[in-house]
Image (cartoon, helix red, strand yellow):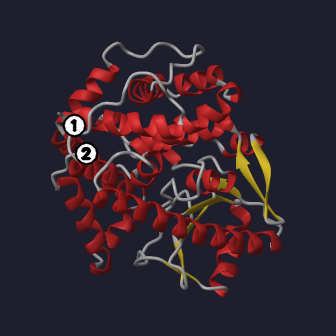
Amino acid sequence: MNRWDVLAAICDRLAAGLLDRTGSPPAAIPSWEILIEASSHQLVTPALAWSMRGADCPPDIHDYLDAVLTLNRSRNQTILATLSRVTGVLNGLGIEPVLLKGAAHLATGLYPDPGVRIVGDIDLLVPAEGAADAAAMLADIGFDRAGPTPLVAVAMHHLPTLCERETGVALELHTEVVVKSHAAFLPVPWFLAGTEPLALGGLRCRVPDATRAVAHTIVHSELHHGGHRYSTVRLRPLLDLAMLRARYDYDVDWQGLQAVFDRNRAGDVLTGFLACAEALFGQPMPAALRRPHPDAVERLRQAVERPETARRPRLADLIAAYRTRVRTKPQVLVNLLSPRLWPLRLRTVRDILRPSKW
């Protein structure tokens, strides 16, 4: 069984357990070890564990999946408690934060159990003019700056990552939804216009509507993380999309999204992502979208089978990004010479060069 078939086997079980998809029997499991390895790399093991409750599997696999789900549930409950503390601080400053990505999915109960979705950190969109005061207040209640501090500041779409001292939960205060190079897809005024209030234990926050949540999912996965350019398949955002469609499909302005992506010369990014979701999760392409390129899914299949082909463009993009940064702000060259930042940069290069099956 090839790598694409392994991903398809995982998605069959996720669709049956989370999307109520019935019909043809799920693809055969190649081996439990391969299934666990692939789902772990794709950050969907807790979702797989939820979907396979009661499935006929070896006792050690059952115990492992149950433990993963239980541990992730406990961690997400900690994240929700931290989110409440942070929201309370922000409300005290007159800020209603907008919950982004995993934090929004967790707070709105997009998934049937708090343990299903792996959440890396808390991403919140706050007004740019209040972000510095918010960070200072959070420092007072136990949030420290994570990682080494660059000698020369580099413009980002969020403030430096903060980490809660007691729990280890990471937090990013965004002043833009996405990086500047992709901001035209999700301009802040347009994004805020489509947010909705959410009561969080008596506290005030907001979440994106279905259209903006879908747009952010695709831009973050396919453009920010290069999924489209490198022809990589990332199951966690694909599953987020599938869950959003299962709950809100009729509320998504697909025609409007097609116009946004076309205007930014990325129509194929939108249709290609939806085509991949259709191939793996069985959700039909929205009628309002153009049909994807006939070879879109086949190209993904081939890339999944040969993950090493993405190494060269990843390295080229990394070098190009440094060149652009140095050209526009020459003083950041000092950061490249700082030994404090070498471990991070070496880890980035190592991750690109390291062989990966998934």
Residue 63: image location, x then y, percent:
36, 62
Please indicate whether residue 304 sits to the left or right of residue 127 in the image. left
Check whether the beta carbons of the residues at disc 1 and disc 2 lie within 8 A of each other.
yes
Q: Position of residue 272 (x, y in %)?
A: 42, 25
> Disc 2 marks which amino acid?
Trp
Query: For residue 142, what is the image quadrant?
Result: bottom right
Taking the image as shown, residue 200 lies to the left or right of residue 248, namely right
Report the front residue among 73 and 204.
73
Coordinates of residue 350 in the picture (x, y in percent): 20, 61
The residue that appears at 41% across and 65% down in the rendered structure is: 67
Q: Residue at x 65, y 35 (%)?
A: 247
The answer to whether residue 185 shows anywhere in this view is: no
Rendered residue at 25%/66% (across/down): 347
Nearer-N-terminus badge (1/2): 1
Residue that carries the numbered disc 2 in the rendered image: 358
Displayed quadrant of residue 212:
top right
Q: Identify which amino acid the numbered label 1 is placed on.
A: Arg
Query: On the image, numbered disc 1 is attached to which residue?
Result: 3
Say whether residue 87 is visible: yes
Where disc 1 sits, the SS reads: helix
Task: State how many labels appear.
Answer: 2
Percent position (x, y) of residue 319? 26, 52
